[in-house]
Structures are given as structure tokens and as C-alpha cells.
Image (cartoon, helix red, strand yellow):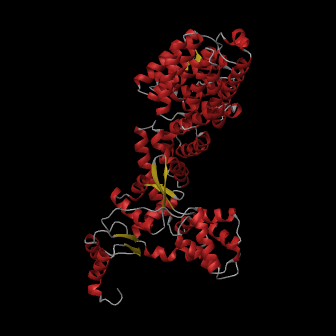
Amino acid sequence: MSATSAEHKAEALRAHLADHPAVLVVDNLRLTAADAQHLIDFLRTLPSGSLAIVSANTPGRLPAPRVLLQELQLQYMQELLLREARRRSVPEIVGADAATFERIHRLLGGNPRAIELFVLACSRDGRSLSDRLGQLESGSTQLADALFSVVWQEVNEMGRSLLRVCAYLGGSADAEQLRVALAVPAADVGALVERLWSDGLLSSRQQHGVTVYTCSAALRLFVLNRTASGETVSFAGRLAEHFIARFSQDWEDAAGAGAHIEAIRLLVRDLHRHEAYEQCVKLFEVTLDIFFTLGLFDDRIELGWVAYEAATALGNDEQRSLALSVISSTHAVRGEAEEAARTAQLGLGIARDAGSAREIARQLRCVGFALFRAGQAAEALAVVKNPQEDAEEMARAAGDPNNMIDIQSLVGAAYWHLGELDSCEQTVRRFLEACEQLPWERGKAYAIRDLAEVSLMRRAFADSGLLLRQARQIAEEYRDVRQLVRIDLTDARLNLFRGRLLRAHGHARKAAVNARQLSLSGEQSEAEATSRYATRALFMPWLWLAAYRRPRIRFTSQTVGGD
């Protein structure tokens, strides 16, 4: 080929491939639009029996079947790192341990170009490998410039903005977040992502069924050093408005929110930091149920206090009360009685000072719920069913159906724990009817499980099983991990009292493990007790006849449900 003139090379190559069928490999090709057309014309007339594999740094220019390659995984990054270290005589890298290679991979990702430049930097002065890694982790401008400044110059301004969004969001973002933050069409985002991915600046992975684009820790620090605070404020504002609009409508879409949880956490904190208090509080309000559904209790408490501070800055007592009710309820469901009671009393004081019947009803429910989860069911009823301040009626009169339903759930659970099954059933049927009218599909799972427990206590086992399957179907659809724990517990109880001891043990163990992970202390205690009694009855069948044939309300002093 080298002896052939440039204008005849294509014909000579085509003739050679016709006589000698082969695989033509074109490696590491960067094409302009004009160059691409010449290659397209050649590939279209490739002789039969031959094929071409083109490795291009400019994706989308060739109309051919494509193979997308992932960035280097740890094993292959380590091989490249060792090869470059031996070539450039960097003994510290050659002798590094597994933990160090993992640290380098976390910082650089699988970007071959960054890996090669990192080894080059390590070979040029007397700094230790540990110092170099520390520089990367601390955002050292000098080392980061050596790794990324050249390729940064090759990225257009829109590409740089996309990297800034990714870096701002903790190093990862999906296409929806990028589109919203940049305020550009989805097609433009796709083209930008593809170019940055092909240049090794972004990698991709699947998370919650969505493709997430990530940049390495070192690149993230490099990009943040080149991002003005005004840009991140703009990104945060657009994303907040988008999520507020979306989850105001889809406030139960825990499955759809899964990919955005990290971004929402960051935004609530950042909006508060930039004194965008109204957006901060509103974003918290529209997502607080999603965090509860997913069992993210630490986030509810932490972000609740952030929202409380933002509401305080706005001077909005109703929003302060709402934030405190979230914090108190979360402490209560985790069995943190003192914190729950203290926060509920603070909220009740704010509600009374504001003179808001709506918020007083909300806080009475919080006080009652804290008592209930502390094992004081009768005292909880006394708070919310006080003739002078009937919390359910106050919430109904204030036009607050969500809080009214929460109160009904609490009252029904308290009646059940006190063994007042008729009162429990009447309350829970009002609870279910209110959920259907709202409508609140996920809430129905709570009422239906409560009815399954009532049927169980009345030995209507077939009805109980049918209700339990309905509740499970709803809870699984909405990924309500908290309620699934309780459904497994009721399933264990149902099987225990029916004499299906192996099934009872299995459901109880599952409920206990998941309750422990979610810090649901009452549910965990009951599930562990149910598991123990099922195991005993397996080995001592007479014990089931004597002690477990007749359903009982509970095996421990702990309370379950109520929210």
C-alpha cells in the first residue's frame, strides 16, 4: 500500500481485499464530517468476504453496527497502570497493594489517558505515591491540570457545562437531570454525552433501571475548580423546580424517584445554603413521603431539620410544624421515644402559638404517635380522641385529608393493640374509605393489612390471607419497604396460628431482618418473637395445640404500625 499514490490507495486496498478476504482494522480514528464521507464511500463498496472494524473517537459518523465499550474495570486498569509504571520506572506503583489500586481506580476511573498521565506525573519528581493520591483527593490544581487540562481544552463550552452538572451532582447524573440542569433538548444531551464518553471523560452504569453517567473523583474535583458558584445556583434552581413540579403530581412515585434521591438530598441542603428557602422547603414537602416509603429515615430526619431552619428563616409556622412532624414521626417509628416526644412537643407549641387548628391536629397526632410507638396505646388514644380536641375531626374540618388519614391509622392501631377489635375495624374502614376518596392507593395497603389482622384474630383465616395478598400487591408496586415488613409479620402470624410453622418461621425471619435494617424496633421484636415460637412449635407439636392455636394480639410489649 505504501508504494501506491494517495489517490489510488482506496482502489488498491479494495482490490487486495477482493483477492485476499481479510479483516481491516482501523484504530483510534478521529473523523471530521468530510473525512467520514470518504470512509463511508469506501466501506459501502468493501468486497464480499472482507469486513472492517473501526475504533473511532468521534462516534456517530459511520452508519454501521456499533459496539460500545465500557471504561476499564479495576483489573484492566491495574494491568495498564503496572505496564506504564514499569515503562516509566515508578517502583512505588509496581509494588502497590490492592487497596492502593482500588484507591487509584476510585479517583481516576477507567480512563486510559488519565492513567497514563498520572504515571507520567509520578515519574517526574520525588513525591511519594501517597502524596500524589492525597493531592488528587484534596483537589490539587497542579496535578489535576496535568491530568485533564489538555483534554479540557478540546471540550466545547456545552460539553464543559455538562461535566459541571455531573460534578455538581456528586459525580453522577442521568439524562433527565442533565437535560433539566442545562435547559437543552434531550437529543443535544445524548450527543454531548456520547462525545464525552468516547473521550473517556464519562463512564456509564445502570442504576434503578436508568443509565447514569459518571465522572471520576479526580475529574470531578478538576471540574469543580473551574465552576463558578453562579452556575451551580442556576443548576440547582432548574433541578429544584423540575422535581417540585414532578413530585407534586407523583408524590408516591418511589420507584421513579429512586434514581434522583442523591440529587434531591444535595439540592435540599444546597438550596438552604444559598438561601433559596422557599424552594428548599417545597422540595422537602413533595418528597418527604418518598423518603419514608423507601425507608430512608436518616435522610428524613436530617433534611427535616434543614427544612425547619429554612421555614424558620421564612417565618412560616405551618412549614416549621410540618418539618417537625416529619422528624418526630421518624424518631417514633425507630423507637427513639425521647427524641420523638421532645420534637412533637416543640411542634405542638409552635402550632398553638400560631393558632392553627390544622397544625394543632397534626401535632396532636405526633404526640399520640410517639406515645403509641413507646407502648402506650391507651395514652395515645387519650391524646387524639380528647373530646375537647378530637384530632381527627379537627383535621377533617381544616381540610387536611392526609393528616386525617394518619390519625385514623394511629387510632385503628391503638384499638387493635388494646384488643378492641370492633372499634379497630370501624376506624380502619373509615381509613380505607378516605384513602379511596382521596385517592391514596399506597395508603390502602395499610388499612387492608389492618383488616387482615382483624380477620386473623377472628379466625377468618381465608379472608385474612386474601386481604394480605391485596396489601402486598400494593406495597410491592409502590416499593413501600416499611409496610412490606409489617405484611411479612402478619403473614408469619397468620401461618403460625394456622399451624403452618415452616412458612411462619420464614416470613418472621424475613420481617425481622428487614425491620432491623430499617430500625423498626417494634416490628423487629414482634417478628423475632414469632420466629422463636414457630421454631419451638416445630420441635414440640403439642405446644402449638396448647399455646398457639388461638390467635393472640401480640407476643411482646412492643407496638406495631400506627403510621
Q: Is residue 185 in sight in this rendering?
A: no
Report which quarter residue 521 is drawn in: top right
At x 62%, y 42%, the residue is: 298
Q: Is residue 30 left or right of residue 524?
A: left
Task: Residue 68: give x, y in percent of width and height.
Answer: 42, 61
> 350 or 328, which lies in front?
328
Does residue 492 lie above or below 387 as drawn? below
Which residue is the extreme one toward the front? 19
Report which quarter residue 491 is drawn in: top right
Q: Is residue 549 left or right of residue 108?
A: right
Task: Residue 200: give x, y in percent of width and height.
Answer: 48, 67
Task: Residue 271: give x, y in percent of width and height.
Answer: 51, 52
Where's the N terminus, which quadrant?
bottom left
> 242 or 290, which lies in front?
290
Task: Residue 34: give x, y in percent of width and height.
Answer: 28, 76
Does residue 505 lie above or below 68 as drawn? above
> 149 or 14, which lies in front?
14
